[in-house]
Amino acid sequence: MGLKELEKKARKLFKEGRVKLDFESGKRVYFSVYSREIHSVIFDKEKNEFKCDCKYFSVKQKECSHIKACKLLLKNLEKKEQ
Ligand SMILES: [Zn+2]
């Protein structure tokens, strides 16, 4: 999958409300992404690093559509707070 396709898929997941922020602790933020399967995405605040449990991420160690979708959600939440 190319980068553009990933972005497109991420925007779609976000727009359709498939990304949920489940829980935030001092160090981490936990998300669920309801794609064909449910994926867990964790943002490590100290390392400033995202992790996903999907195959794409574990094989390529690159940002998958689920992580990108979580980033969109975070951006959106920041906007609302301002
Ligand atoms: Zn993923």
Image (spheres, rainbow, N blue to C red):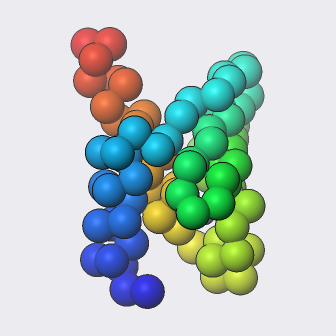
Where, quadrant-wise, is the N terminus in this rendering? bottom left
Relative to 22, is 32 above or below? below
Instruction: Report the residue at 40% width, 53% height from top.
Output: 13
Q: Along the line of sight, which residue is nearer the eye, 6 or 37?
A: 37
Q: Quadrant of residue 45?
A: top right
Q: Quadrant of residue 58?
A: bottom right
Instruction: Report the residue at 69% width, 49% height from top.
Output: 40
Query: Where is residue 23 drawn, in percent x and y?
Result: 68, 24
Query: Where is residue 77 drawn, in percent x and y?
Result: 37, 25
Instruction: Report the residue at 32% width, 13% height from top.
Output: 81
Instruction: Report the residue at 37% width, 86% height from top.
Output: 2
Where, quadrant-wise, is the C terminus in this rendering? top left
Relative to 34, is 80 above or below? above
Considering every residue shown, the one lying at the far front of the view is 36
Relative to 75, is 58 above or below? below
Would you say residue 63 is visible in this rendering? no
Considering every residue shown, the one lying at the far top of the view is 81
Query: Would residue 44 be found to the left or right of residue 13 on screen?
Result: right
Query: Where is residue 80 drawn, in percent x and y?
Result: 28, 17
Q: Assign ligand 1 to one image quadrant.
A: bottom right
Q: How many marks?
A: 0
Would you say residue 3 is visible in this rendering? yes
Query: Would residue 59 be found to the left or right of residue 33 on screen?
Result: right
Query: Would residue 21 be found to the left or right of residue 61 on screen?
Result: left
Query: Would residue 37 be found to the left or right of residue 77 on screen?
Result: right
